[in-house]
Image: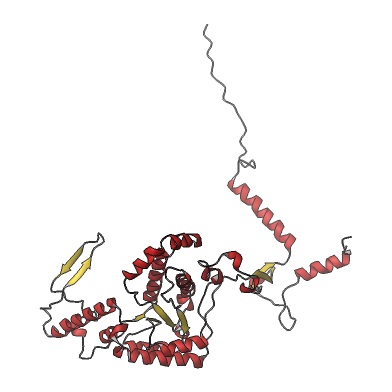
Amino acid sequence: MPRRFSTDSRVELSKRRMAPSKNAKGNAIEDDELKGRRVVWKPVLSTPFTYRWPEVPDEVGNQFLVELLRLLDNHEESHDSEQSPSSNISRSQDKTQLGHLEGDKHRLGLPHSTHVVELRSGKKLQIPNYVPPPRSKLHPNNLKGDEPGLSKRIKCANVISGINSTTKELEKEIQQKRETLPHTCSANFTTTDQGSSSTTEARLHEKPPQQQLSFIFVCRGDMNPLDLVDHLLPTIANLNRYRLQTYSSEIHSTVSQPLVILIPLPKGAENQIALALGIKRAAIVALKGRGVRVSALSKLAEDHIEPILPPNIISIAGCSKASPKSFTNESVALLPTHIKHYKTTAPTDMRKHQLERLQNKKQHIINHHPMMTGGFNHTWNPVKPNHKIIN
């Protein structure tokens, strides 16, 4: 039988609902902006498909910063075998360009460099005897005997700095993974079973893999606002998902696909990294490749950093080698339910608020649709035809 409340209890309950909000001491909050309204807290179920930044203490962050600065200082002495072909080409081009510009420092009118401009139509035009603009860093007047910017850029061939450059590199690799990997697990089974012999032949003629991103350092303590780098979390998780799928597939089982590690640095790291690179600002620094040079960073990352992975990474990692039925309940980690509360306002007297809304709605209809409510008081006077009588 349903529980019934007395009239007094109903009145008391309505008074409690209409009472203004109170502070910690129990006093009513008097706010001019909340006249006729009260503060309420509404619960919202949090989604588990979110990514969180790695929690790194300041001591560990300083260790990462020291190892990164040491790597940037000793990058020039790295082995030539660790350099990618594209980086070697860009390095030689920068050296020749630097030589031309330094040789033409005192001959501003007769430079020997050639500038290539690519039009929107795809056509390339070569501009001989090109002189950089006066504000450019490559202008002969802006070059000094020990130019830090270009020399550091030549030295750090496997280092990417900047938010846009790092994001572009991440999206480029994701696009390459999408084109090479099958779209579904069933397609992966059919291609691997039918083309096992063809894949072995393709591996022999396959080009050596280019160096991929390994570490991304973000000077999050120096960022303002922090929303500028929030897009890195889902982007890195998406790339790690494709790398795990590549590693677990039978086509690329012999090629190791390490994950991208995101490392936030403490406050004050941006200035030190910028000085090491010879640039003004360095909010993000990304490293490509893994080897002896980054062994200390890899060791620290294994001990203190967890890679950013999507929530359904268990099913993705075993997609090509196992069916969904093979996964037990023990292999699926369920996240606990998390409820958030957000602060908002509500009318103090709900009945009065509803009546006001109804009256405003009627007034709006009267003002915008006068024909429906009789707004025009015109009497209907039909037009009589004029008949002429001819005798």
Question: Which residue occupies the foreground of this view, 195 or 217?
Answer: 195
Name the colouring of the figure.
secondary structure
Q: Quadrant of residue 14?
A: bottom right
Res 325 visible: yes
Residue 117 in the image: x percent, y percent? Answer: 21, 68
Find the residue positioned furthest to the top: 391
Residue 34 in the image: x percent, y percent? Answer: 66, 71
Residue 93 in the image: x percent, y percent? Answer: 21, 78
Q: How many marks?
A: 0
Q: Is residue 365 left or right of residue 66?
A: right
Question: Which residue occupies the foreground of this view, 237 or 182?
Answer: 182
- Is the residue 379 above or below the residue 199 in the image? above
Res 182 visible: no
Question: Which residue occupies the foreground of this view, 226 or 241?
Answer: 241
Find the residue positioned furthest to the front: 197
Q: Quadrant of residue 273?
A: bottom left
> What residue appears at the point 32 percent right and 88 percent down from the top-left corner?
75
> What residue appears at the point 75 percent right and 81 percent down from the top-left corner?
26
Residue 59 in the image: x percent, y percent? Answer: 50, 93
Q: Is residue 192 left or right of residue 138?
A: right
- Is the residue 183 above or below the residue 328 in the image? above
- Is the residue 52 above or below the residue 124 in the image? below
> What residue appears at the point 46 percent right and 92 percent down from the top-left corner?
63
Location of the N terminus (image quadrant): bottom right
> What residue appears at the point 38 percent right and 65 percent down from the top-left corner?
199
